[in-house]
Each structure stands twice: as C-alpha cells, then as structure tokens.
Image (cartoon, rainbow, N blue to C red):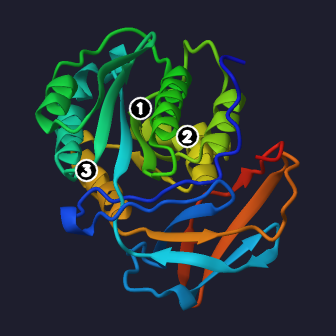
C-alpha cells in the first residue's frame, strides 16, 4: 500500500459552495466528536431544506446517539476537482472543461480548491487556491492523452486534503472530491480496495461523474455489478452520476453544487468510548415520509487514546 494509513478521521466538517461570507461561521470540533454532513432528498431526488434538529436521528452500530450540534449554516470547503484527460476524452474534453469551470466559479470567498488531471498519471495542475481565475486557467489548459490512472488521482486528492485538514487544527473545513471520468482505471500503481480503504478513513465526500456511452451503460447494467466509483461515493456520503451525453455535464455539476449547498451538519459524541480502531457504522434517519438521508457509512475509531 502506498503511503501511511490515515488515522481516525472523526472530526469532519461541513461547508457549502454558494455561501455568503456572513453565513460562513467556522465550526470547531474536538477529536472525540463525530461530525456528519447529511444530504436529505425526497422520492423524486429533490433536496429537502428547512429541517430541524428534532427531525434527525443518528445511530452508531445500531445504537441511538445524542445530537450535540446541528446547523444549516454553511462552512468553508476544501475541494479537489479531478478531470480525466486520457485519450478517450479528446472529443468530450471541451464540454467537460466548460462544465467544470462553471462549477468552480460557484466557490465562496472562504473556499479553496485544487485541480488534478489524470491520464497515465495524476497531475496537480493547480494547488489549492481561492483564485477562481487560476482554477479556470488550470482547467482550460488540460489536454487529452494516454491511459487512465483514476485510482492514483483519487489517492493524491485524498492525501492533499488530509494535509489541508492537518494544517487547520481544530478549525474544521468541509472536504470533498468531485471527479469526472469516462473509463476504468488502467494504469494506477494501487488498486480499488486500497483507494476505498483510504477514502473511508479520510472522511472526504466523493462525488463521481461517469461519462459513458449508451453501449457501455447497457453492458454495465447487464453485468449487474456496481461501479467502483459508485461504491466509493456511497461509502463517503457523496453520490455517483452516470452521463451518456457530454451536454448533460453542466446540469450534473449544478446538481452537485446544489447538494453541497444544502447539506446539514450533525455532530455527536459517541456513546462507545473505546479507542480500539474498529469500524463504526453510522446511519442517519429523518422523521419525514419518503425521504432519504445520505451521509458517510461510518468511521474508524481511534486506535489509541489521545
């Protein structure tokens, strides 16, 4: 496995892309607080705003937990924008760039983002910045060539976000990856299981866009297997989208921005105080009919007392 394993990423923040400066009051959390970013949608996949703390119930390993902090207020975000620039993306790259630029301009004044493209390898073409023009230049200069090092690109983004989190101290900043790819990984030096493990340890939400042809989509559905990106997204509280036409990308990026802009922050101190390094499953339920609350599937408890 490349690199050290992440410790327990228990304190994870929430943030929103379209927040006003006055609304972005930074949430601070101690190491023993579990922070959840929760997206609530109805049966038609419409976001559900305006919920109160009393509408939510949190369970860890099936045991009810007391919510100690609740907020609908936006928090700053650290965002990794990942673009597939393998050779197969050549005819679709302009549409992908336009959509990604439209997404990046929605960053708030306290947010930071980086741009990573990946072909044979992952390349950080723009380190974390608040400069929207720099982000656009980085996206626009990407070129299609080579194969697809998808897993290593996610790994690099997770590592960079971990460093941002470490530098922030107790100032918690929402962390997310938004990636676009049109193919399977073909050239990463790490495998899917390693990436999934790191993603679950990091607390970073992953939103993935699969740009597939209709033929590819039919073959995928026939196999009955779930894509790796969908599994990573589900485990981290993000979401995976399948797109068959590049013209749909702008709408999908808009949907992701809307989700980031309408999440709820829930925090609790676990009733299980053991520092045993075990996986703790987390489920959030909402007292509203025909609604679904989406968050990370769990976290790893600390291995040793802090």
The residue that mark 2 highlights is 229
Could you say where residue 290 lies in the image, as x and y percent from the top left? 54, 85
The residue carrying pointer 3 sits among few (fewer than 14), some (14 to 19) or many (20 or more) residues within 10 Å by Cα, namely some
In the image: residue 148, left or right of residue 248: right
Q: Which mark is residue 128?
A: none
Find residue 195 and report its image quarter: top right
Q: Are marks 1 and 2 in contact (CB under 8 Å)?
A: yes
Q: In this view of the protein, can residue 175 be seen by the observer?
A: yes
The CA distance from mark 3 to mark 2 is 29 Å
The residue that mark 3 highlights is 110
Mark 1 lies on a secondary structure that is strand
Q: In this view, which residue lies farthest toward the left?
A: 133
Give the camera-side residue of 168 and 2. 168
- The residue that appears at 57% across and 15% down in the rendered structure is 188
The residue carrying pointer 1 sits among few (fewer than 14), some (14 to 19) or many (20 or more) residues within 10 Å by Cα, namely many
The residue that mark 1 highlights is 181
Mark 1 vs mark 3: give the one in front.
3
Could you say where residue 222 lies in the image, as x and y percent from the top left? 62, 44
């Amino acid at each position: 496995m490349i690199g050290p394993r992440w410790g327990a990423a228990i304190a994870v923040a929430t943030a929103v892309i379209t927040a006003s400066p006055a609304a972005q009051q930074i949430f601070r959390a101690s190491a023993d607080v579990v922070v959840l970013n929760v997206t609530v949608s109805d049966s038609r996949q419409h976001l559900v705003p305006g919920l109160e703390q009393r509408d939510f119930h949190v369970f860890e390993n099936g045991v009810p937990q007391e919510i100690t902090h609740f907020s609908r207020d936006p928090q700053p975000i650290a965002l990794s924008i990942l673009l597939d620039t393998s050779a197969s993306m050549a005819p679709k790259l302009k549409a992908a760039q336009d959509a990604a630029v439209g997404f990046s301009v929605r960053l708030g004044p306290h947010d930071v983002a980086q741009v990573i493209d990946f072909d044979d390898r992952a390349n950080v073409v723009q380190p974390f910045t608040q400069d929207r023009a720099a982000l656009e230049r980085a996206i626009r200069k990407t070129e299609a060539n080579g194969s697809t090092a998808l897993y290593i690109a996610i790994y690099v983004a997770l590592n960079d976000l971990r460093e941002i989190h470490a530098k922030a101290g107790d100032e918690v900043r929402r962390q997310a990856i938004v990636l676009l790819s049109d193919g399977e990984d073909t050239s990463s030096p790490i495998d899917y299981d390693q990436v999934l493990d790191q993603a679950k340890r990091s607390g970073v939400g992953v939103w993935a866009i699969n740009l597939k042809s209709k033929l590819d989509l039919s073959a995928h559905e026939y196999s009955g297997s779930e894509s790796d990106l969908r599994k990573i997204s589900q485990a981290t509280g993000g979401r995976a989208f399948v797109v068959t036409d590049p013209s749909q990308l702008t709408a999908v990026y808009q949907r992701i921005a809307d989700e980031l802009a309408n999440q709820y922050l829930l925090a609790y101190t676990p009733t299980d105080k053991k520092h045993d390094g075990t996986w703790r499953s987390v489920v959030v339920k909402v007292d509203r009919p025909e609604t679904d609350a989406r968050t990370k599937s769990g976290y790893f408890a600390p291995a040793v007392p802090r």
